[in-house]
Structures are given as structure tokens and as C-alpha cells.
Image (cartoon, rainbow, N blue to C red):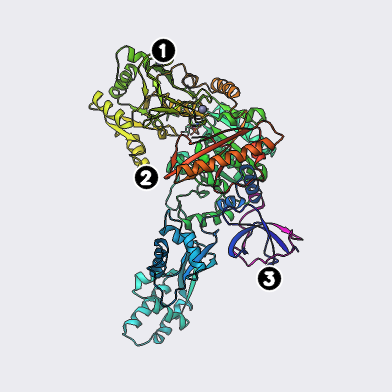
Amino acid sequence: MKEFARIAVNVPEVRDQFDYAIPPELASLVSPGCLVEVTFGSQKVQGVVTKLLDQPEVAETKSIAALVDEFPVLSQNHLMLAFFLSEKYLQPVSGFITAMLPPGLHQQADTLFKLNLPSDFESDSLPDVSRRIIGKLTERGPLRGRQLDRTFKNVDWRKTARSLVSKGLLVSQPVLPEPAVRRKYSRSVLLSFHSQELESVIPALGFKDSAAFTRRLSVLRLLAGESQPAEISWVYASTGANSSDLRWLEQKGLIRFQSEEVWRDPLRDARGDLHYARAPVLTREQSAIWDRIEGLMDQRAFEKPVLLHGVTGSGKTELYMSAIEKALAQEQQAIILVPEISLTPQTIERFMGRFPGKVGVIHSKLSPGERYDTWRRARGTDFSIAIGPRSALFTPFPNTGVIILDECHDESYYQAEMGPYFHAVEAAIAFGKLSKALVILGTATPDVNLYFRAVYEKWPLLELPSRVAAQSPETPAAAIPDTLPLPEVQIVDMRAELREGNISIFSRSLSERLRDVLASQQQAILLLNRRGSASYVFCRDCGYTLKCPRCDFSLTYHRNSLSLVCHTCGYTRKMPGKCPQCGSNRIKQFGTGTEKVEADLQLLFPSARLLRWDADTSSGKGAEEVILSHFRQHNADILIGTQMLAKGLDLPLVTLVGVVLADVGLNFPDYRTAERTFQLLTQVAGRAGRSALGGKVILQTFQPEHYAIQFAAKHNFAGFYGQELSHRRELRYPPFTRMVRFECRDTNSDKAQQVAIELFSRLERLANASSDKTFELSGPTPPYFAKRGGLFRWQVILKGTDPAKLLKDEFFSGIRVEVDPPSLL
Ligand code: ADP
Ligand code: ZN
Ligand code: ZN
């Protein structure tokens, strides 16, 4: 039996692990993956055992103080995944461990502050922050550091508290808060005697005719009529008895209490969609692909993921379900990840319809109690299909057989808001290998980098090029369904519209088609990609956009200084008076919002029923669902919205999709903008013509010759991919190099800049000292979104063949480090 354990402690910014002795009473219980409590420095903290050891690496070890959960909270595979991700993304392993545990179970250490004031204490002479801390502790009693954080936002109260501690006015003490979540129990009662003996116990119930007697008797009568223990709240409600009556009856030995755990299940009231209850006969295309997937599962070929490239509506989800069914038949579990925005009730109901009683959802909107219970139910395979956004990858199933990522190109798979920063696609690929599960990456518009890797590493690449035709009631059930062509896409040159005197934001083709749609009582969607629409400058006559001569990114217009700035390298120039390409003076910034589109459209079609869907109208909880169902029920004719519209909606009456300005997204200063525009336009085009009514797509643009627009219009991924790849090879962007982005944030821009400048020199020294000569540094510069959450941002980019290797032993305190970030915005 091993006597020592290596532990990853849950302390922010601590990357190393530490060895502890296992006390004899815990020797048989502690194993890798166990959550324990230990002393770390002067703090009590939690940590996870990563390894058992015969000998510790240091001479002196402290002992593990306690075991928090009787079972390991992480499997060996989950632990290995946490280490793999920690190394790949240069993030502390405890961050990934925390992400794998339900919130509330894993606690970070904290410090408790108490007053220790002399009796003659006078606070008047103290500075303001000291007085406020003392005031707060006088008012509320002892408080933990994180409670004080909430009171003193943006104030460095800790420094002040430390000086108060050294003056002896405060005492501080390390504490570990209790887990914030607990199991939930329901209490019930039952008779301790046979119900036929009820009459004989009545004399023991106290003074006949007293109120207590009546209540006690009615409790016994109620229980005598029940074949099962009765829930306490129900007993109270139906008898008027109170808790002291029940305690009295228990003391007399007449009833017994029972306690049973109740699961908090977020799907308790959800019903499966019976339309999907039975698997359809697969189309020929689907069958061919299913044979491949089934073959891989049978051969247990789990080294490589499968890339399932199928246009929207091609029946990918049906194939996911076949793979899930096969995994379940082998007593395995399945994880299906979807982008945050597609985790709608329709998605869940579709899976529940096919797999009743087997589905669980895991996402951040669940209450901590629901997440805790769902996590434990998964660990015990109380359900076997987990659906959710990227965090659902960490579902603690004992034997995951298949991991599916739907719309795997979606950027919500990258965790960017808070550390640990990582990409769920990479995490899934790694986890598939570790746990011997087949990983299926499904998408209509694969990432260029991912596709490149799939070709290079020879992953199975499965293509579904056509759509499944909707079944009509006359089709015989056993018939193989037909496929449908993709909708026709027309590109409209807005420069020509202007030249011919049409200054409206709607081209003549678009207005004509809208008129037809309204006349035939069908529906249309208009999309305006608003993100960044007001900040790029282009020529209305030739479509020319101003770009950085060094980075080839669009320059961003800064209203205050009337200048144009490159957000990658810092290049700055004055706003020109004339177009450098054609000499026209109609060169200016673009700015149109969804409100303006709505207003202009209403002028054009006064009787049309319009509905607007953007960040302003869909902010409330459930607002998106309301807007969508309103539209689906044909209570509106035209839906106007931003890029949110593009994803996964199935709206059969929509026969026209118009993109107000297809080139907007092309002008972000980021190497993936062409790709994002191509993806967005392809996805949007997929919204039209999802039924026998057919459909048409109109892309309005000032840059009709741009390859992203041209290839999107032809639904031609291969063409786009080829051209984009040669562009990236030329400019040395991924996949031909790799990047690490460093970001410094501060309330003060100069401070953030200063940190970034020092960081730049440090990285420069590191790169120069290395034998690897592929490194390239750019910055420091503020990124395109120069401020986030009230903080100024400055960034430095390191490019190279393997930049993470250079940084393996470096530690960057207070700086965000992102390896392979999908965006530099
Ligand atoms: P994707 O996931 O590629 O967008 P889906 O699996 O959602 O495609 O399929 C699109 C529509 O076609 C759905 O309504 C689905 O029920 C239907 N469908 C898919 N495969 C078949 C099939 N083999 N027979 C009949 N209908 C199908
Ligand atoms: Zn021009
Ligand atoms: Zn530049």
C-alpha cells in the first residue's frame, strides 16, 4: 500500500503539484482522482490526488487532512485529460480539474477576517479604506476575503487589511468554506405498527378531544391508509399536524421517519418529440457513411476523429443518433456537444424522443444543485446520453463510447471568457484517444485549420453533399428518401446599384423578391452582420477597403482621431480624402443597424409584418424562443436579424434569405475573417428552401469578386479552402504557423501597455536564446476590441512552429496566455 500522494491543489495561479503523506485511517480510501483537504502554506485548501507514490520527492511531508467525497471525483482518463490540456494550453491543471467538477464541490481556500480592536479604539485617525473595512466588520461580524471582494469592488482592500493585521487591529485565519452544494433529501413517515392495530393504539394518544389528540389521530389514520411512506410536507398539508406532533408520535414508537435522496433533474418536465421516435430509413448517402462509422466503432479505431462534412439538413443528426444507439447497445455512454445557441428545447426533445429516459443535459444555466445531481447521476450511469455545450465534455461517465461535436466550427467551443482557455474540439480529440471513444466532428463549414489537419493526418473524411427531402405523407414508410438541391444564390453588386441611382439599402432584385414572397404568403429572413459594421472604411465606387501594408488586415476607423489603425501591429495612418484605387471621394465608414433596416423596409412594404431579432430584442431569458416561435407560426412575414439567425433553424416557410451587406464581416482585423464570412454566408444560405417550396438567397455586396463571397454563393467549400490556404501560406498564418496571444488588462491603459512592453522584451530574450529560429513577435498593441469589462487591453502575439514549447517553463503572472486562439480580436 502506498503511503504518499501527489496532489494538485486548488489555489489560483499555482501550477506545481505537491506530495503529502496518507494518514493510516485513509490508506484504504485514497486513490487517484480523490478530492481531499490539505494544508498548503498556512491555508486549508482542497486538492485532487493525481498519483500514489512510494516515496515523496521532498523529505518533509504534511498529511492529508480529510477526504471530501467517498468516491474518486475524477477517473484516470479525466485526470490525464486535465494534464494534457494543462500542458498544451499552458494553464494550471487545477483550472481543468475545477472545470471537471460540479460547481460548489470544489472549494477554493479563503481567509477569514475578524476585528481585534482595543476597547479605547478610535477610528478617526485611520485612512478611508481602513475605516470602511472596520465599519463593515463591525456591522456584519467576521467576513471571508471573497465576501469583502464583493463589498470593495475595484478597491485594493487586501493591502489595507494586511497592514491592519500587522497593527494588530484585525486577525486573519485561513479557512476552507463548506461545499456550496449538498444532496437533497425528502423526508417521509410511515407507521411502525400494522395498520389493523390502529384502534388499539388510540388510547395512547393523549387526552381525547384535545386538539393535539385529533391531529395525532388523523396522522395515524392517513398513514394507515397508505401502502408507502408518505412525504412529510403532504402529511402536514392533509392533517393540520405540525412537526412537534410527528416528533411526539415518533418518541412513542408509533411512526418512523425515512429519508430518501431526491435528484434535482432539469429535464423533469421535458417531453420527447415523438416525431423523431423512430429512426427513418437512411438515404443512400447516409447509409454509405453509416457503414464507415459503424466499421470504425467495430474495429475500435479510436486514434483519429471522424470529420463529418455535411451541408445543413443533410441528415448528420440522424447519423449521430445511429452512433449513439450503437454505443448504448454496447453498454457505453455518449456525449453530444452542441454550440451554446443550439441547445434549444427542440434539440433536447429530439434526442429525448429517440432515446426516452436516457438523456441528461449539462450546461451552465442549471442551478448548482441540478449540476451536482446531474454530475453524480452521470457518474452512476443513471442516464447515458449527455447533451450540452463544451463543458458537457467533462461528463463523468465511466465508459464513454462516442463523443459528438455538432457544428464543430462554432466559436463557442473555445473557452475565451475565463481561464482555463482551451478549445473543446482539441479536448474532445484527446479525450477520445484516452478513453477509447469515437469522436465525430460534424459541420457544414469545417474550420480551415481543422480540415487541413484532417487531410494531413488522414482522418476519415466523410461527406454528405445533399439535403434530405422532407417526407410527404404519401411516401411509403420503407422507401429510401430523396435528396434536395441546395438553394440558388445570387450575388448583387451594390456598386452598380449606386451607379444606376438606387441609393436604398435594398437592391432592386432584393425588393422584387421580397414583394413576391409577401404576395405568395411565404416568409423571408434578412441578415445584417452588425458586429464591427461601423468601423471599417471602404470605397462606394470600387469596393476597395483600406488595409494594413504589413499585416493585410483591414484598418479600423477611429472617430476621435480621424485615423485608421492596425490592431495587430499598430500601423496608423490618416483617413484619406480619396480612394487610393479609383480616386473617388466616396470613401467613408459604413454604419447601418438592424433598426435602420427595419425602418426602411417598413417604408417599402407598409403592410408587411416585421420582426427584429438582435441583441437588443432578445436579451431577456427565453426571448429568443418567443421570437422564433412567433415567426415559425407565421405571425410575421420578414425576420430581420444579426448573425444569431444563421444557426440551425429549421423554418420550412422561408423561401428567401437576403444578406444586406455580405462583406461586413470581411473587414475585421483577424486572419480568420474570410473564413468566418464564408461560414456565416454558407450557414445563412442553408436557411432558405428547406421544403418543397424551394428557395433563393441574395447576397448584397460591394466586393462581389471576393473569393469568400463567390465560393459561398456556389456552396463550394473545396474552392474556398484551396484559395484560403494559399493566402495563409503566403502570409504565414495558421495552419502554417502557430500563435500564442498574450493579453494584459488594466483599468489604466498606460499600465497595461507598460506590462505589455516588458513582456515583449522578455519574450524577445527567450526567442533569441532559443535554437528554434521560427519565432516572430508582434505588438504590443491594443486589440480591435480595445476594452473589455471596463479594462484596457494590450496584446503581444508570438508566432512560430511550436511557440508553446518556448514557454513550457515560463510563468506569466496576471497575464492571459492563449495558445492557438481562434481570434485575435
Ligand atoms: P443536419 O443535422 O445535417 O442539419 P438533420 O439530421 O437534422 O440534418 O436532418 C434534416 C431533416 O431531415 C430533419 O428533419 C430529419 O428528421 C430529416 N431526415 C434526416 N434523415 C432522414 C431520412 N433518412 N429520412 C427521412 N428524413 C430524414
Ligand atoms: Zn475606389
Ligand atoms: Zn498591421
Whether the residue carrying mark 2 lies under 8 Å from ligand 1 is answered with no
User: Where in the figure is residue 477, as x and y percent of width and height?
Assistant: 49, 32
> For the residues carrying marks 2 and 1, which lies nearer the camera in this image?
1
Q: Quadrant of the N terminus?
A: bottom right
Q: Of circles 3 and 1, which is in front?
A: 1
Q: Which mark is residue 582?
A: 1
Q: In the rendered structure, which disc, 3 or 1, sits on the residue that comes first in sequence?
A: 3
Q: Which residues are magenta?
A: 51-78
Separation (CA) of disc 3 from disc 2: 51 Å
Query: Mark 3 or mark 2, which has the lower sequence index?
Result: 3
Give whichever of 542, 195 is nearer the camera.
542
Closest to the observer, 703 or 509: 703
Residue 360, position in %: x, y? Answer: 51, 49
**Residue highlighted by disc 3:** 25
Q: Going 35% across and 88% down the picture, which residue do you hit?
A: 207
**Res. 699 in view:** no
Which amino acid does the dot numbered 3 rest on? Glu
The amino acid on which the numbered mark 1 sits, given as a three-letter code, is Cys
- Mark 3, other Cα within 10 Å: few <14 / some 14–19 / many ≥20: few
The residue closer to the viewer here, 171 or 361, is: 171
Q: Residues within 10 Å of mark 2 (few under 14, many from 20)?
A: few
- Establish whether ligand 1 lies closer than 8 Å to the Cβ of label 3: no
Q: How far apart are the alpha carbons under marks 3 and 1?
A: 83 Å
Point out residue 78 in the picture as x, y percentages from the top left corner.
Answer: 63, 50
Q: Is mark 1 within 8 Å of ligand 2?
A: yes
Dot 2: element: loop
The x and y percentages for residue 806 are 66, 39
**233 over 561 or under it: above or below:** below
Q: CA distance from mark 2 to mark 1?
A: 49 Å
Residue 149 lies in quadrant: bottom left
* Mark number displayed over residue 622: 2
Magenta span has 74?
yes
